[in-house]
Image (cartoon, rainbow, N blue to C red):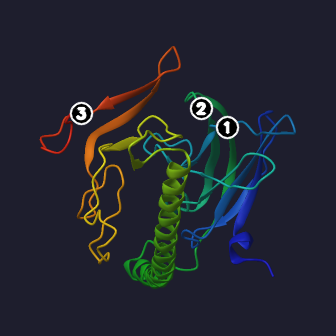
Amino acid sequence: MAKLTEARTIEVNIDTVQDWQPDIRLNAGDVNGRIIRAVITDDRQNVNEGGLTARLLFNAFPGSRKKAGGYVTMTAVPGQETATFEATVPRAALAGGTCALGVELTDSDGSIVCTRTFNALVEPSVLNLESEEGEDALKELHSGIDAMHAGTVAAGQAAGQALLAAGKAQEAAKTAETAASLALKAGQGISLGPEPPLAAKPGHVWLVESQLKRKPLYPGGTIWPGPATYPERPGRLADGCHKISAIRRYEGQDDHGQDQWTGFKLDLTEINKEEK
């Protein structure tokens, strides 16, 4: 079943060759009801040039020195084999009689590369738009249609925005998790120990653990070890804390292949102390 949009669309083939363009037929009562779709070809060949824009020119009083006419910007139609643009016929073009129409093409440099004109035969509206009563009735009809359409569109947009926000939040969480995992695998991040990490990349922070050995709390074998018994291990304190002697950041290797570390000076009594 055809959509109403397709039924009210008037397709006009615009070729850059100056061929004759047939007239089209409109009705003065079709306010925002007819769509002009311009299919662009260049000497019968499809046009796929990027940056093209189009405008629909109109003048309901051709030849008049007092009426300059006007234009509306046309929208590109995606998914077409050749450049295609469309726009709704504005109400100002439906004054009745003959209306001069034209499609103006502009390239990415802002140059008007082609303008093709044709006529629209505008049939009179059943309602007398020039009378106050007829114009009010038409406005009321279209206002009701516009309000219903706006409500439907707003509801759809709200639902779409909610789904989009949820999707972005989930995507952001996955991206952060992936980045953290890659950073750890790549040798970035923070390491702790008396020796530098085997795999490190620029930006890696190394918490240098003290190499001084600490005596266990219960050195004698005759004393039964309790919960506070602390085994001997370099850089560990009796309370289970790590003793940090320096903080360094890996900068990469120099021209001789030597690792370069930058030390940080912190105002702490237990850090950056030279060990004996």
Toward the viewer: 121 or 254? 254
Q: Alpha-carbon neighbours of circle 2 within 10 Å: few (<14), some, or many (≥20)? A: few
Numbered disc 1: secondary structure: loop
Residue 47 in view of the camera: yes
Give the alpha-carbon distance from disc 3 to disc 2, as whole Å.
73 Å
Lower sequence index among marks 1 and 2: 1
Toward the viewer: 77 or 68? 77
Callouts 1 and 2 close, C-beta under 8 Å: yes
Three-letter code, disc 2: Ser
Q: Which mark is residue 229?
A: none
Residue 59 in view of the camera: no
Residue on which disc 3 sits: 276
Residue 135, how many percent across, how many down?
Answer: 42, 77
Toward the viewer: 217 or 107? 217
Residue on which disc 2 sits: 108
Q: Please identify, in this view, whether the residue under mark 3 or under mark 2 is nearer the observer.
A: 3
Numbered disc 3: secondary structure: loop
Give the alpha-carbon distance from disc 1 to disc 2, as whole Å.
7 Å
Residue on which disc 1 sits: 50
Q: Alpha-carbon neighbours of circle 1 within 10 Å: few (<14), some, or many (≥20)? A: few
